[in-house]
Image (tube, rainbow, N blue to C red):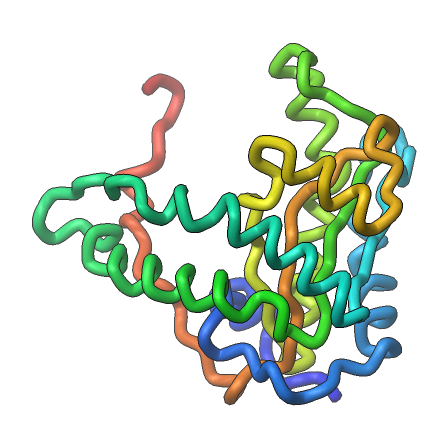
Amino acid sequence: MTLNLTVDEVLTTTRAVRKRLDLDKPVPREVLTECLELALQAPTGSNAQGWRWMFITDAGKKQAIADIYRANALPYLDQPKPQYDDGDVRGERQQFVTDSARYLVEHMHEAPVLLIPCLKGRVEQAPLGLSASFWASLFPAVWSFCLALRSRGLGSCWTTLHLLGDGEKQAAEVLGIPHEEYSQGGLFPIAYTKGTEFKPAKRLPVEAVTHWDSW
């Protein structure tokens, strides 16, 4: 079932969902397949379509991946936080985001489904231009997938902390991903959301982040 949302509403209310993930409601495979069919319409460099989509529903494997995520996430979350000026919307939301992130660390394994999108190739030592074009062949499809989830009453959160250190290789070993051949682009808990009403987030004003013809 799809929600009665306009395109603008989907674009402005697709949030990073953590505490409002319904960890007890099953997610049918056919819903994920439907969302992925939409996501695969996203552009990909040279039409290579080198993406692969690893969905994880096995409880043991979810726990193993969540343990890798936790080992990397907790030290990161314990680091000092950026300081913002009074009135900066980023500072206003910082504690909420941190608390929400810690909640996800403790409950990642309980999500009905985890997703790790992958792309064929490795670019660790590549120049910036090649690295940018590489990820541009995966990330549009990943975000399309998130938007499709939102339009059907599901949510997710784009996380990357499991990739730190040896985490990506450890996850590849758990899941049988050919690590030397495919790069992982993130880790996504997927669940129906508790309620479907989400608001646009507070962001910096357009004029504060926009330049015309020169910086």
Residue at horizontal 8 percent and vertical 49 percent from the top: 86
- Residue 23 x %, y %: 60, 81
On screen, residue 173 above or below 183: below
State which quarter of the image contains the C terminus.
Answer: top left
Residue at horizontal 91 percent and vertical 34 percent from the top: 48
On screen, residue 83 above or below 40: above
Q: Please say whether residue 9 is visible from this viewpoint.
A: yes
Residue at horizontal 69 percent and vertical 38 percent from the top: 168
Q: In the depicted view, which residue is nearer to us: 30 or 141? A: 30
Q: Quadrant of residue 212?
A: top left
- Residue 111 x %, y %: 64, 73
Q: In the depicted view, which residue is nearer to us: 62 or 132? A: 62
- Residue 108 x %, y %: 58, 66
- Residue 187 x %, y %: 65, 53
Q: Quadrant of residue 97?
A: bottom left
On screen, residue 94 above or below 4: above
Residue at horizontal 79 percent and vertical 63 percent from the top: 56
Q: Please say whether residue 150 is visible from this viewpoint.
A: no
Q: In the depicted view, which residue is nearer to us: 49 or 184? A: 184
